[in-house]
Amino acid sequence: MLLGLGDVWISAVYIGNIIAVLLCVIYGIINWNSTDKSKLED
């Protein structure tokens, strides 16, 4: 029983979900104020 959950696969899904959320947040922070070069060309 990992993290108090009944199955190892359920725990793996929760951990994977947390990792995906963290990656999305980090990506958003990095690209928050970046300019889109395709918009500058027009």
Image (spheres, rainbow, N blue to C red):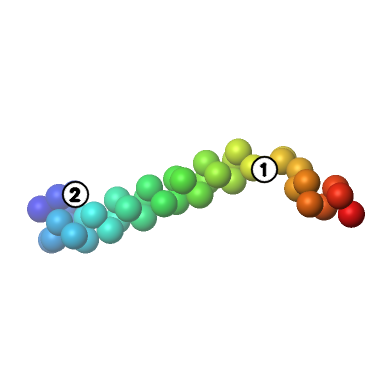
Point out residue 3 in the picture as x, y percentages from the top left corner: 19, 49
Q: Element type at marker 2? A: loop
Left or right side of 1 for 15 = right
User: Above or below — where is 6 with respect to 15?
Assistant: below
User: Above or below — where is 21 with respect to 9?
Assistant: above
| C-alpha span from label 1 to label 2 | 34 Å
Mark 2 nearby-residue class (10 Å; few <14, some 14–19, many ≥20)? few
Residue ID for mark 2: 3
Q: Image quadrant of residue 17? A: bottom left
Left or right side of 16 for 21 = right
Question: Depth check: 26 or 6 in front?
Answer: 26
User: Split into 4 quadrants, where in the image is the C terminus?
Assistant: bottom right
Question: Residue at point 52% right, 41% down?
Answer: 26
Q: Element type at marker 1? A: loop
Point out residue 2 in the picture as x, y percentages from the top left corner: 15, 50
Point out residue 18 in the picture as x, y percentages from the top left corner: 37, 50
Residue ID for mark 1: 32
Residue lying furthest right? 42
Point out residue 33 in the picture as x, y percentages from the top left corner: 72, 40
Instruction: Choose the circle earlier in sequence order: 1 or 2.
Output: 2
Question: Residue at point 13% right, 61% down?
Answer: 6
Of the numbered discs in the image, which one, if any, rests on residue 40? none
Left or right side of 10 for 26 = right
Question: Residue at point 28% right, 58% down?
Answer: 13
Mark 1 nearby-residue class (10 Å; few <14, some 14–19, many ≥20)? few
Question: Residue at point 29% right, 51% down?
Answer: 15
Question: Depth check: 37 or 30 in front?
Answer: 37
Q: What residue type is labelled 2?
A: Leu
Q: What residue type is labelled 1?
A: Trp
Tag in front: 1 or 2:
1
